[in-house]
Each structure stands twice: as C-alpha cells, then as structure tokens.
Amino acid sequence: MKRVVITGLSVVSPLGCEKEMFWQRLMRGESGIGTLTKLDATLYPRPLAAEVSGWEQLPESQDESLLPFGQAVAYTVAASRMALEDAQLNNPENSNDFGVIVGTTMGNQDIVERVIDKYSLTEESTADAILADELDYFSPAILSAEIAKRFGFQGSSMTLANACAAGNYSVGLAFDRIRTGRNSVILAGGADPFSRTCYTIFHRLNASTAERCQPFDKDRDGMVVGEGAAMLVLEDYDHAVARGAHIYAEVKGYSLTCDAHHATAPHPEGEGAVMAMNEALSMASLTPSDIDYVSAHGTGTPANDVSEAIALHTVFGDSLSQTPVSSIKSMLGHCMGAASAIEAAVCAMAIERQMLPPTINTSNIDPAFPVAFDVVPSEGRQADVTHILSNAFAFGGNVSSVIFSQLDKGTQS
C-alpha cells in the first residue's frame, strides 16, 4: 500500500477565505457566528448564522462564468484553486492520474430556490411554468465535474452526498484510492452554501440555538447553521517527495460506518461512531493511547454531544479525561458538507504547527457524560501532536472517522 500525504489545503469559511487569517482567528478563539443576513431573519425565531466572510475578496466572486451555477460550485472552484496553489500544483503533468472528490449535504439546492423565486412558483405550479434549462446545473455531480473540467483532472470525478459527514467521506475515499494506486493526486473536500431549505430544516427540528453554540457544555441548547468549503490535496507520498512538495500531514486510516438507527437522531450510545473510531485506529495500526487530540463532531445539540461523549468514552475509557478534545463548530457553526472538510484542513495545520484549536463558549462539561474530558478552552494552545482522530456524524446514521498523523521524523521532504 502507498502512503498518502496532504500537500495543499484551503478554506472558504465564516472566519475568512485566506488560510493564514483563518488560522490566526481560529487560534484566537474568534467567532464567525452572527445574525442571519442571507435570508429574511424575521422569519426565524433564532436567527443566528455562520456566513462566509471575505468572499468578495476572491476573484471567483466576480467570475461571470460561475453565475449559472449554484454557490456550492463557486465555493468549490475557489477552494480548489487555492488548495492547488498552496500545493504548487497548478499545471498537473499527468491529468489522467489526478482526481477530484467533493462531499456535500444540499448540493445545488439554491438553484431550485432561485427558480422558485424567479417564477413565483407554488404547489399548484406545473412543470411547463419554467424553462427546462433553468435547472441544468442542479445535479450535485456538477460540483466535482466542474472542478475536473476547469483544472483538467481526468483521473476521476465524484460527488458524495453523505450529509454532514461528506467531507470526511471524501477524504477517506481519496485516501483509499491513492493508497491502492488508483490515483497519484486527488483534490478532496466538501462544500455547502446557505439555502432556505437547509436553514429551515434545522429550525423546524428545533436544533438551532437561541444565543450561542456551546459544544459539550451542560447548558448547550443547539447548533448554528453555517456554510463554506474546504479542499485538500491528497497525494502519493513518493509523488510528493519527487516534486519537492511541502507536506502538512499524513493520512493513516479511516472508516465509514452507519448507525442504521434513525433518520435524524444519532444512536444514543454512538454504536456507529464507536465502530468507525475503532476501525480507523486499526487501519492506522494505532491504539487510543496514541491519539494526542480528538477533533470532535461536537455540534452543540443535546443529543449529538451526549452520543459522541459516550462513544468516545467507550473507545478511550477513562483516559479520555487526559485527551484534548475540541469542536471548532463553536466558532464556525455547522457548515454541513464542508464541516469535516474544514476540520480536516485544521487537523493538518494543527499537526504542521503543533497547535490545538479551542472550543469557545464551553466552561462546564455536561455532568451526564461518562467522564469530563479535556476540552481545549477559549484559545488555541501549543501541544505535541503526532496523531489526530477526526469525527464526522450525519443524518441517516452516516459516520466517518479519519486519522491524521505527523510524517515520520526523518522522512519529511
């Protein structure tokens, strides 16, 4: 099996679209959450949102060729460009060997909403009320297809719609394809923009917080809907070394599982999460004691957080109290299909810079948890980080865990 490393990354996020600014704001514990502006806030009793910041500063915001597409495509194009530039891979020498995998929750749902508004459609409207070509770009497959087209990647093109675990699914599948020799380089990540549909769903589920996102806190009352994108360049280690690439981290293992429990609620004991974490550790030939940090799914909802806490305790035992854990959703909101992709980028940077991101707003760990684990508070902190476990959970019971590791000393290019 081939080794797989991360050689480039980017974010389009509520804390900015420039990598260094994003990282500094994250480490300072700044929040990208504010009052909803992209939809009519008066329609929602809890109108908090984590909207992308700095988009207007990117060239893609003025790119007229992106106008027919949904915003997810525009975010993905921008994130892909920046990730390739970061990896210094702007002119692929073997396009048949390069692929792209994008994860999403809602895909191009905003195109449907655009059509509804344009034609004032109602439940009584007929199909001939709109022009056929208005929905030409609705298919989620467009997310990966347009990246492959624009950047000349002919090796593979896949879009995964695995809800809020889709970013980790993309990274895991890319890792699998590279380690088995199917591709040398894959752009992998996730993207989701704001849509009325997504925002309203979470409000109707009473999952949204009224004041702030407090993952794992005893007073938590919900999550915040966010948006964004992140793309990572995953690469065959030998290919990366041969071209003198900078290596952020190595991907060592992953697992994809399913609770098969409920359409929206997590399994109360986190059975799928336990299986995913154990399988990812096994693939990476690691034990829980090897993990220096857990990047938690941590949405801030009562059900999700207690399920994850129980699952983590099942895997780590009481040593969980000594294992740093954080949820950056406290600052970024839940960016849907982009969430775990952004978290993957943060994990890679955490290994490169030996820093752990914080969880803000969390001061009292829920006493209902099996153990009060070590949540990184308020601001980022220095740490010796060799191995990171990153969790992502989604509706339908979709679960994915990925292991990111520091490249073995003496092998860094």
Image (cartoon, grey):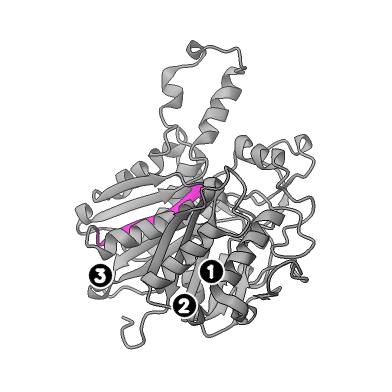
Q: Is residue 228 above or below residue 361?
A: above
Task: Tell me residue 405's x, y (percent).
Answer: 42, 76
Give the alpha-carbon distance from disc 1 to disc 3, as whole Å.
Answer: 30 Å
Residues in magenta, as a range: 183-192
Tell me which secondary structure the magenta stretch mostly adopts. Answer: strand
The residue pinned by badge 2 equals: 387
Indicate whether residue 184 is drawn in magenta. Answer: yes
Residue found at x 51% / y 66%: 390
Q: Amino acid at mark 2?
A: His
Task: Tell me residue 404's x, y (percent).
Answer: 44, 71
- Residue 149: image quadrant is top left
Frontmost residue, 277 versus 81: 277
Residue found at x 45% / y 65%: 402
**Residue 20 marker:** 1
Crowd class of label 2 (few under 14; some 14 to 19; many from 20; radius 10 Å) = many
Indicate whether residue 152 is drawn in magenta. Answer: no
Q: Is residue 354 above or below residue 182?
A: below
The residue pinned by badge 3 equals: 2
- Residue 360: image quadrant is bottom right
Crowd class of label 3 (few under 14; some 14 to 19; many from 20; radius 10 Å) = some
Looking at the rendered image, the quarter that the C terminus falls into is bottom left
Residue found at x 40% / y 54%: 80
Q: Amino acid at mark 3?
A: Lys
Q: Is residue 275 above or below residue 132?
A: below
Secondary structure beneath label 1: helix
Count how many numbered circles sit on residues in the image: 3
Give the alpha-carbon distance from disc 3 to disc 2, as whole Å.
Answer: 19 Å
Q: Amino acid at mark 1?
A: Glu
**Residue 263 marker:** none
